[in-house]
Image (cartoon, helix red, strand yellow):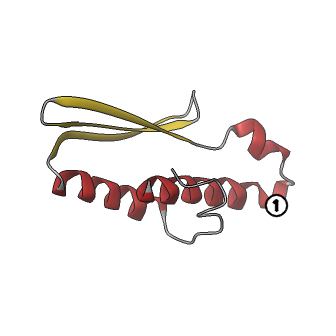
Amino acid sequence: MSGPGYAKGTTVDVSKSRAEIDHVLVKNGASSVGILNDSDKAVAVVAFTIRGAKFRLEIPMPLMAEVEKVPRPRQWSYWDETRRSAWKRSELS
């Protein structure tokens, strides 16, 4: 997996990275693909089946406690940038 600095500062929207992950999975024979967010655990989950084998990948997302430490005018952009970076790293893993 790529390190945390790999996609830092990416401008690629989360929805585009999620769509690319879905596309690659389906193209490679995955079925029952599901992508969801678990805000209680601060993770996004990608679950799918390939040839009967079930997989579940957890992508760490920013904790609200981390976001709240950032000075107020920048909290939203920090949260958004951190999410974009996490999804982009996952797309390339």
Residue 8 figure quarter: bottom right
Q: Residue 16 in the image: x percent, y percent? A: 39, 64
| Residue at image point 64% right, 53% down | 4
Q: Which residue is drawn at the image coordinates 64% and 60% (left, top)? A: 81
- Residue 62 lies, in percent from the top left, at 65, 44
Judge left or right: residue 40 versus residue 56: right
Residue toward you, 56 or 14: 56
Question: Eyeballing the image, is 24 above or below 29?
Answer: below
Q: Is residue 21 above or below residue 50?
A: below
Residue ranking furthest to the bottom: 11
Q: Crowdedness of circle 1 by 10 Å Cα count: few (<14), some, many (20+)?
A: few
How many numbered markers are drawn? 1
The amino acid pointed to by label 1 is Pro
Residue 32 or residue 69, whichever sits in front? 32
Q: Position of residue 54 (x, y in %)?
A: 24, 29
List x then y, in percent, for residue 82: 64, 55
Q: Residue at x 14, y 48 (%)?
A: 29
Residue at x 87% of width, y 54% of height: 71
List the residue tagged with mark 1. Answer: 73
Q: Nearer the viewer, residue 10 or 80?
A: 10
Quadrant of the rendered image containing residue 63: top right
Which quadrant of the figure has residue 6?
bottom right
- Under circle 1, the secondary element is helix
Q: Is residue 13 above or below residue 71?
A: below
